[in-house]
Image (tube, helix red, strand yellow):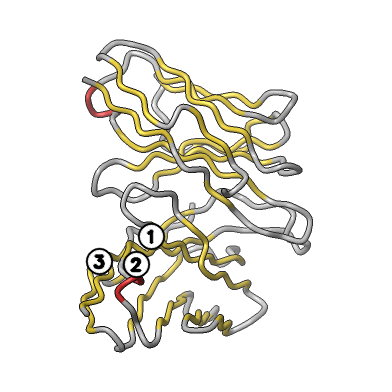
Amino acid sequence: DSGVTQTPKHLITATGQRVTLRCSPRSGDLSVYWYQQSLDQGLQFLIHYYNGEERAKGNILERFSAQQFPDLHSELNLSSLELGDSALYFCASSARQGGYGYTFGSGTRLTVV
Amino acid sequence: GENVEQHPSTLSVQEGDSAVIKCTYSDSASNYFPWYKQELGKRPQLIIDIRSNVGEKKDQRIAVTLNKTAKHFSLHITETQPEDSAVYFCAATQSNAGGTSYGKLTFGQGTILTVHP
């Protein structure tokens, strides 16, 4: 267990629908990062939140949005889903005192049918 | 922004051989370089990392070297075993001196390592 919790683990939904992915960072970590990993693709950065504030945005589609709540958990909202949005979505958190770096959650596998 | 190039994209070795994966980065401000191992369908797991104030770091059979001048870093795995078979990703980012704040990680494209028994 990495300490980063992602739910749900699997999600199957239809095109045009909206889903919410949830991430709870390791205890004490203030940063949450979201990454998308499509089949045969690397890890594409989506967005970074630090203590509730957006810090950086990557190639995140306008149909996607995220937020980080006061308790530091984060949600990634994906709307008007398309077949091409099927992917593994990972969140990661950093960094505990002492610099443990980045740790990834187990991911949410999204399948759009 | 940062760009990380990783080579080779696939690497096949015999058990017991060494494997080397190389990465180059573009942003001279990057100062933290982790390596992740990802098994099929699993999360990327940190296997070793290096900061820009050191040139080499070893942990048992794995080592990472960093050349700041040339902006490249490499992963070395010795005495490879079948369980080393996975996808390996290099990455780069900036962190503060205390290691308590990190920017976004920029990943290389990944190397599929296959170790044949």
The CA span between labels 1 and 2 is 5 Å
Residue A53 vertical placement versus B34 (above, below):
above
Q: Residue at x 46, y 62 (%)?
A: B36
Amino acid type of the residue tagged 2 in the rendering = Gln
**Other-residue count near label 1 (Cα within 10 Å), few / some / many at <14 / 14–19 / ≥20:** many
Badge 3 and badge 2 both on one subunit: yes
Q: Is residue B80 left or right of residue B14?
A: right
**Other-residue count near label 3 (Cα within 10 Å), few / some / many at <14 / 14–19 / ≥20:** some
Q: Which quarter of the rendered picture does the C terminus of chain B lie within? A: bottom left
Residue B12 vertical placement versus B47 (above, below):
below
Badge 1 and badge 3 both on one subunit: yes
Do the residues bearing badges 3 and 2 touch, measured as CB atoms within 8 Å?
Answer: yes
Q: Picture coordinates of residue A15 (x, y %)?
A: 25, 14
Q: Residue at x 56, y 80 (%)?
A: B59
Q: Is residue A105 left or right of residue B95?
A: left
Determine the chain carrying the residue at label 1: B
Q: Is residue B81 left or right of residue B47?
A: left
Q: Residue at x 64, y 27 (%)?
A: A68
Where does label 1 land, which residue? B108
